[in-house]
Image (tube, rainbow, N blue to C red):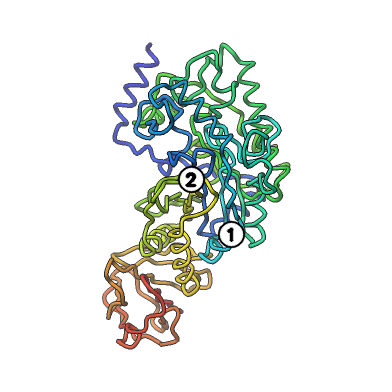
Amino acid sequence: MKTLIIILSLVLCLSNVSAQHYAQKYYPETDSMAIKKIQEWQDLKFGLLMHWGAYSQWGIVESWSICAEDVGWTKRTKGNNPDNYTEYKKEYEGLKNSFNPVKFNPDKWAKAADYAGMKYVIFTTKHHDGFCMFDTKYTDYKITDKGCAFSTNKKANVTKEIFDAFRKRDFWVGPYFSKPDWHSEYYWWPKFATPDRNVNYDIKKYPERWEEFIEYTYNQILELMTDYGKIDILWLDGGQVAPLSREEIVKIMMRPDYQFMHLQNQDIRMGELKKKAREKQPGLIVVDRAVEGPNQNYLTPENQIPGKLLPYPWESCIISGGGWSFTPDAKYMSTRKLIYTLVDIVSKGGNLLLNIAPSPEGIWDEAAYNLLKEMGDWMKINGEAIYNSKPLKPYKEGKVCLTQQNNGTVYAIYLSEEGEDTPPSKIWMTHYQPEKNAQIMMLGSKMQLEWEAVGKGFVVNIPELLRKNAPCKYSWVLKITQ
C-alpha cells in the first residue's frame, strides 16, 4: 500500500510531464554494425508502414475490439453479438476462415512506393490479436493455415511476398511484430478473464507459463529472422511487455488509456532476444517501441510531429488516411499536407513512416495511389533536399524549412498554404544567411536567382517567369550553393 501511495504521489507531481514516446531518454547503441546501420537508416528519410490482417474484413481498428478495456478505440461495432464479449471474440477470431485477399499484388504496391520516393517498408507480421501474416510453425492462427480461405493461394505467405517484392526495388524491409499476443494461451490464459491489454495471470505465481510465452515469442521472431531473407529492422510494438521499474510504472500510469491496476513486470529479456536476432541478422536495427532503454534504437512518436529538433534517431509514424487498418471510404491527406509533413520531420532530423492500409481483397485505395504519384512527382525534382540531409538552424521559420548536405549545400524549402498555387515573389528568412558569394537556384530550374542579405537573414527574388512556370506543385526548394 505504501508503494502504491508513493507511485500515485509521483503521478500527481509529474502530471504535466509529456508521456509521448519522443520524451523518453535515448540510449545509444553500442554494436558497431548496428550503429552504422542506424546512421544509414537516418539518410533514407521516407518509409512505408502497412497494417493488414483478418480484421480488415470488418473495416475496424486493428485487434483492439477484443480488448476489454473501456476506451474509445475498443468499441465493438461489427459482428452478430457486439454486446456479448465471448461470442464477439469467437466471431472475430473466425475472420481467419473467410480472409481471402485474392487481389493481393505486392509488386504493384512496391512500384507505387518506389515512385513516391519511399526507401523502406515495415509490415505487420502479427498484431496484438496474434493472427500471423506469415507461415509460422508455432500456431495455426495464421494466414497459411488450411482453415484460412487464402491458404491455397501461391502467395499465401504474404510477408514473404511483400518483403521479396520490395527488396527487388532496393527497399529495406522490417517486420512489425506485436510482443503481446492475445490469442496465445501463454499470454491470455483461458483459465482467467481478460480485463485489459496485459497478461491475465500472475507471472510470479505462474512463472513456467510466462517462460512458455517467452519461448513462443523468441521462436516466432527467430523464424522471421531466418526464413524471410535479409531483414533490416525489427519493429516491435506493445510497450507494456517490458521490465518495469518504479519510474517506468509511473510513466505508464500517466497515460490516460492505461488500466494500471494490472501492471506486472512483463520481462521477456529483450537484451537476450536482440542478441539472438542479430546472430541471424548482423547489424539489425531493433525498435522496442516506447520501452526506454538500449533496445530502442530509434524513437517513434505516433501520429505527431515533435515541435523541435530531436538530437537522436527518430521516426514519426503517420496515418495517410482513415485509420491504421483498412477503413471504408477513407479520406486521405492532401499531397500538400504530405509534403509539409515530410519536410517538417526531416528538417528536425527525423524520418517519416507513412501508413497505408490494404483492403480485405488485398488492394490499396486509388486515392492512396494518387497521393503517392503526386508525391513522387515532387520528390523527383526535390529529393536532393531530403535524402541524406541534415538539420540546419533555425530548422524552420515561418513557411520555410532548412536542410543541408555534407558538402555545404543548403536547401530552403518553402511550404505553401492551401490555395497558394504559385511561388511567392519573395522568399526570406530572418535567422539564416548564406555566405557572401552564394548562388541560389530553384530546384527544377537553371535560373540564377538574385538575393541580398537583410540583417541576419536574406531575401530571394522569384521572377514572374519562374513563378508562372514553377517546376513543381505545392512546395518550392531553393538550392543554396556556398
Can the viewer see residue 301 in this picture?
Answer: no
| Position of residue 199 measured from the top left corner of the image (x, y, whole percent) | 52, 22
Badge 2 element: loop
Quick check: 51 left or right of 75? right
Instruction: Look at the picture and state if 262 lies above or below 478.
Output: above
Report the residue at 48% width, 24% height from top: 198
Front residue of 80 and 341: 80
* Label ID, residue 406: none
Choose mark 1 or mark 2, whichever is in front: 1
Q: Is residue 93 above or below residue 160?
A: above
Q: Are marks 1 and 2 in contact (CB under 8 Å)?
A: no
Q: Which quarter of the rendered picture does the C terminus lie within?
A: bottom left
Horizontal and vertical percent position of residue 442: 41, 80
Kindly identify which residue carries mark 2.
299
Image position, residue 114 (x, y; %): 56, 63
Q: Residues within 10 Å of mark 2 (few under 14, many from 20)?
A: many
Element on which disc 1 rests: helix
Residue type of the residue flagged with mark 1 = Ala
Q: Is residue 318 left or right of residue 130?
A: left
Q: Earlier in the sequence, mark 1 or mark 2?
A: 1
**Given the image, on which type of amino acid does mark 2 rest?**
Leu
Q: Residue at x 51, y 39 (%)?
A: 289
Mark 1 and mark 2: span between their CA atoms?
25 Å
Quarter of the picture containing the N terminus is top left
Q: Quadrant of residue 444?
A: bottom left
> Mark 1 sits on what residue?
110
